[in-house]
Image: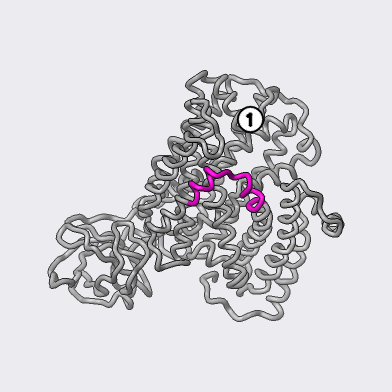
Amino acid sequence: MAGVVPRTSFLFPWSGQSNAWMTARSANVSGHAQHLPCGHAQCFLRGKAHPKRFLYGRPCLTHSPLGVGTRACTRWVCDSSGNSSDLNSASASYRVAWWLVPGKSLETTQNHPIRSVLITGLALFAMFFGAGNLILPVMIGVEGGSNAMSTTAGFIITGVLLPVMAMVAAATSTRGIEGIAERIGRTPGLIFCWMAMLTTGVLYAVPRVATVSFSMSVGAIGSFPNTPGSLSLLIYTAIFLIVTALFVVNPSNLMNKIGGWLTPALLILMVALIVGALIKLPPVLDAPAEKYATMPFVSGLLTGYNTLDAIASLVFGMIIITSLRGFGFQQGKPLFRATVSAGIVAGILLALVYLGLANVGVRIGNAKVADGAEGLSLAAGILFGTPGQWILGLIAILACLTTSVGLIGASVQFFERQFPKISRRTLLIIHTAVAFAVANLGLALLLQVVVPMMYFCYPITIAVVLVSIIDIFVPGHLFYTYRLPVWTAAIFGLLDGVAQGFALAETALPGFLSALLGAIPLAKISLGWVVPVIIMLVIGLMLDKVAPHAAPTDERK
């Protein structure tokens, strides 16, 4: 990890103010000037924010964490010796400002690299830990009975190990999900990005966490109805999404806000609930429910699908990379290692919390509860009485709020690059409005579309993650190894998605489709893509060995 970069003064000769010197938090760069984690900068002149911003000397229509503006600012900067340099040709010999503060001299957080990684890892954990992550492990404990731990082990594979692997894959591209998805082809990659953003964003995951947090907090405590269109739900979701937008509107300190403020509060409440249950409630190892009676490990694997965390890892990748750049980690191995370390921190916390929640479920296994939310409510009431409901409500709100902030932040960042002429604030308003409408109009109809999309995207995600990790260790550039297994995963994922669509509609599969799925190994448990993907992976590696394709233009090697 790089050391602390010396503080440097800069000259910004605009509007005739050629002697207006500033002090800056700075970092070494090569090639182009890096001003903020997002590549933008806010200029200051005599203590006031200059109403313009720049990106490598060109007009910037996206965002600046320190202000709002749309036109290009100066493209010249002077080093401490007074030598001017065009921002477009700034080399490593110059110290180029990340952001500028008049009259102050700030040091980079490279002073505390471990603290920076820890904060980012805590924030990533909180963004992962949403509605499904809170409810599903509890139901595994309730319904798993004597097979609860083996089921939890399967759940941890797809709910923890796979997302951590996905974060490692995300670290191989400084462009996040877009850079990784382009490896399977530009058009297929763009389609995958859109589907991933929509399923983990405003069309499903964000409205879901808004409504679940309502039903587990305000709705449960005040006995308000959780029905689409109810006034209580409408008011709550409006407040919830406005608070989310306030966190997202200024991305410069997003990781500090989540990792430094919200996550510690969430963890304290979670520890109180889990430790209280472990101490006061004895385990109840009843016979497992039917779905966990045979192959509990596989059932846990499939249950982990519902967290969406593997897809979310790729979605969150750009936010994490941007944050770590802001903490001073330079591109290359320092940034890669920091991203992977943050993923491991989040993974360890997720595994510990899942184990704790599953054990809470085991201790109320003899109770008849409809879902994990009701099970947690029962446990909180037994342990703490009426205050327990408030504790659970705060846990639900914090867990869902951090996830909502991360998902909307990532989605806005993605669509900001897709539609550069639309301002960040406008995109944020659109995201908030769509999530609000979906949450209040009802998710039931939308699930008919979103769940099949999820089953379609998950095999693709796993294949992309697997090949991206292989790419780290295999010399040369992989071309067919990306395309063949991922395209194959898409075909079989489409079959799984169609089957889930018929199941949700409570309609029997057409005869030919039923026969086809019956002939594919593991298709009955929605894993029919595994064997074909492995075969195509081996073929792809062989083709890349004997007939190497032209080296890609991305930053994989």
- Image quadrant occupied by the C terminus: bottom right
Going 28% across and 55% down the picture, which residue do you hit?
A: 107
Going 18% across and 72% down the picture, which residue do you hit?
A: 13
In the image, residue 350 above or below residue 328? above
| Identity, as a three-letter code, of the amino acid under mark 1 | Asn
Going 58% across and 41% down the picture, which residue do you hit?
A: 133
Q: Name the residue under label 1.
A: 359
At which x and y percent is residue 254? Answer: 39, 50
Asked whether, in this view, residue 260 is left or right of residue 317, the answer is left
At which x and y percent is residue 130? Answer: 54, 42
Going 40% across and 48% down the picture, which residue do you hit?
A: 245
At which x and y percent is residue 211? Answer: 53, 39
Asked whether, in this view, residue 316 is left or right of residue 422, the answer is right
Region in magenta:
434-451
In the image, residue 252 above or below residue 87? above
At which x and y percent is residue 295? Answer: 79, 41
Query: Residue 428 appears in which quarter of the rendering?
Result: bottom left
Q: Magenta includes 70?
A: no
Q: Magenta includes 445?
A: yes
The answer to which of 427 and 14 lies nearer the viewer is: 427
Mark 1 closeness class: few <14, some 14–19, many ≥20 residues within 10 Å: many
